[in-house]
Amino acid sequence: MPNSEDNTLLPILPLEAEIPKGVDRRSFLMRGAVISAAMVLTGCERTPQQEAAAPPAAQPPKPKPSAMSADLNVVAQSKGPVMTVIDEFYKVGPGPSSSHTIGPMRITYDFYQRCTKLPADQLAKATGLKVHLYGSLSATGKGHGTERAALAGLLGKEPATINPLFLDELAANPTQPHPLKLGDKTFNLSLADVIYDAPKGDFPHPNTMTCKLLAGDQAVYELEYYSVGGGFIEWKGYQPPKKGQPKYPYSTMKELRKHAEDNKLSIPQVIMANEVAVSGKTEAEINAFIDKVSGAMVAIVKSGLAAPEAVLPGPIKLHTKASTVYKRAMDDKFQSDRAIALVAACALAGSEENARGHLVVTAPTGGSAGVMPAIVYALGEGGRKLPQEKIRQGFLAGAAIGYLCKHNATLAGAEGGCQAEIGVASAMSAAFIAAAFDSSPQVLENAAESALEHHLGLTCDPVAGFVQVPCIERCAFGAVKGWTAYMIASNEVETRHRVDLDTTIESMAETGRDMGAKYKETSEGGLAANLTLC
C-alpha cells in the first residue's frame, strides 16, 4: 500500500500548465481541480521543486495602529499583566448601554463629586454646568439615553443605586429643571445642559465627553473624559489606582493556562488567587460580591420573563417577546429544542430589560447584558440547579476571558464593533459553562475561542441608535452559540483544536481596527442604514 505521506502521489499542476494535444480542455482543467482539492483535503504539501516554482506567498498586511490616543490607560495597560479585578468588571447600572449610559453617568457623577470639593471662591463664580458629547456618544446617544444618564450623574445619582423610573421621568419631562446645590449655590439643570456636539473628529477615544462648570461662557473648571467600554471610564491625566501584584501574572491565555497546568490548578483557582493579591480582599469578600452579581442576573431574567408583551420605547416600535418565546418553548415536544429555546428566551428577557433602561449587569457590556444572565439562570435555579460554588467558578472563568479581551483588544462597540460586545459575552459564557462543569483549562480555552471566533467581524449597527435591533436577538444567539461552543469543546479531542484564544483575540482587535467607522456604533451602516421604519 503506498505511503499516504508521499506527497509525490498528488503533484500540483503548474499555474500555466499546457494542455496536451488530443485532450479535451475542460476535462483536463477539471481533473487538475480535483487533484488540487484532494491535496488540500489530505493535507499534503508541495514538493521542494514545486515550492521553488511557485510564486512567493503574499505577506499579510501590517496591523493598523490603534486610532485611540496612546495616552489612554486602556491602551497603555495592554503592555503589562492583567490587573482588572472582578468588582471593576461586573457593574450594575441602567441600560441600555455600558459605554453610552453607565459610563457617562459614572463620568458626570465623578465630575459632580469633584465640584463638591472645589474651593468656595471658585464655586461662587459659577453660574451653571454643561456636558458636551462627542464621537459615537453624539452619534447614537439619543437612542442610548445618554443625555438622561449624564444629567442624572450631575444630579448626584450613581448607576448601581439609581431608580430607573427617575431616568424615565427625565425623558418624559425634558424641559423640567432639577435643582443641584454646590456649596452655597443652587443650579437648575435640565436635559438642555447636555449637548450633542461633533459626531466626527480626531478624538482621543470614540466615546469622548467634556464636563464644564461655567461662569457665564467661561469655564471655571472642566475635565475631558472617555467612556472606554464595559462601563470603564478614564479622564485626561488619568492614573490607575494602586493595586497589589498578581500572584500569577499573565497577559495572554497561553500564560494563564500555563499557570493553571504547572500548578495543577483550575482557571477559576488561578483567577481567585490573583483577585486576592491584586484587590487585597479576602476570598469570602470576593465570593460575596459574585453572589450579589449572580442574584442580580437571575432577578433580571425573571423580571424580563414576567413582563407582559409590550412595545419598547423609541421609533422602531419593537414588540417584546421573551415571555412568549419562554411559554411556547415549555410546550416543545423535543427536550433539545426546548432547551435551546429556553436559553434564548432567558437571553431575550435580559436584553429586553436592558432596552427598557432597567438595571442590568455589564458582562461585559450593556448591549450584551442578556447573554451571561441566560447561562447563569439555565445552570442555576432555572435549569441544571448547580450549586452556588460552581456558579462562582463560572463567574471567575468568564471574567478571565473578559479581562483578556479588554487587555488585548476592546470591549467597546464604538471601537471594535459588536464582536467586542456579543462576541466577548459569548466567549465568557462558554468559559463560564466549562468552568461550572470542571472542564480542563484546555477545554475552557477551546470553548471560549470557538465562541469568539464565530463572532469575528460582527458589526455594531443599532437601528435608529437604539439598543433593540439587532441587539436584543443577538444576545439570544450569543448565549446559544456560547453553549454550542462548550458542547463542541467538551466532546472534541481537546489537543486537536487548531486555533488558540490569543490568536482569535488578536484577530478581533485587528478586525476592529480595519472595520469602517460606520459599522462601529454610529448607526450609519448595515441594518441601521437599510431598515425602513414606518
Image (cartoon, grey):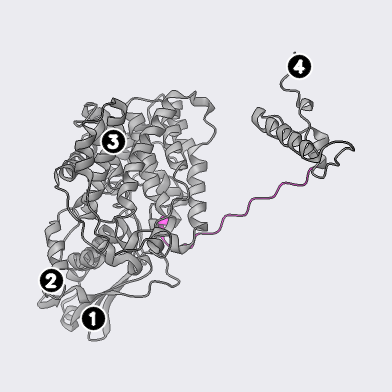
CA gap between label 3 and label 2 equals 39 Å
Please report whichever mark, 1 or 2, sits nearer to the chain's N-terminal start. Answer: 2
Three-letter amino acid code at disc 4? Answer: Pro
Of the pair 154 and 200, the residue shown nearer to us: 200
Please report whichever mark, 1 or 4, sits nearer to the chain's N-terminal start. Answer: 4
CA gap between label 1 and label 4 equals 85 Å
* Residue beneath disc 2: 173
Give residue 2's mark: 4
- Asked if disc 1 and disc 4 are in contact, CB closer than 8 Å, the reply is no
Q: Callout 2: 10 Å neighbours few (<14), some, many (20+)? A: few
Give residue 214's mark: 1
Please report whichever mark, 3 or 2, sits nearer to the chain's N-terminal start. Answer: 2
CA gap between label 1 and label 2 equals 24 Å
Q: Which is the main secondary structure of the residues drawn in magenta?
A: loop
The quadrant the N terminus occupies is top right
Q: Is residue 62 above or below residue 8?
A: below
Please indicate, yes or no, whether residue 496 appears anywhere in the rendered image.
yes
In the visual, does 412 lie left or right of 453? left
Three-letter amino acid code at disc 2? Answer: Asn
Give residue 341's mark: 3
- Mark 3 element type: helix
State the extent of the magenta-drawn residues as a range.
54-74
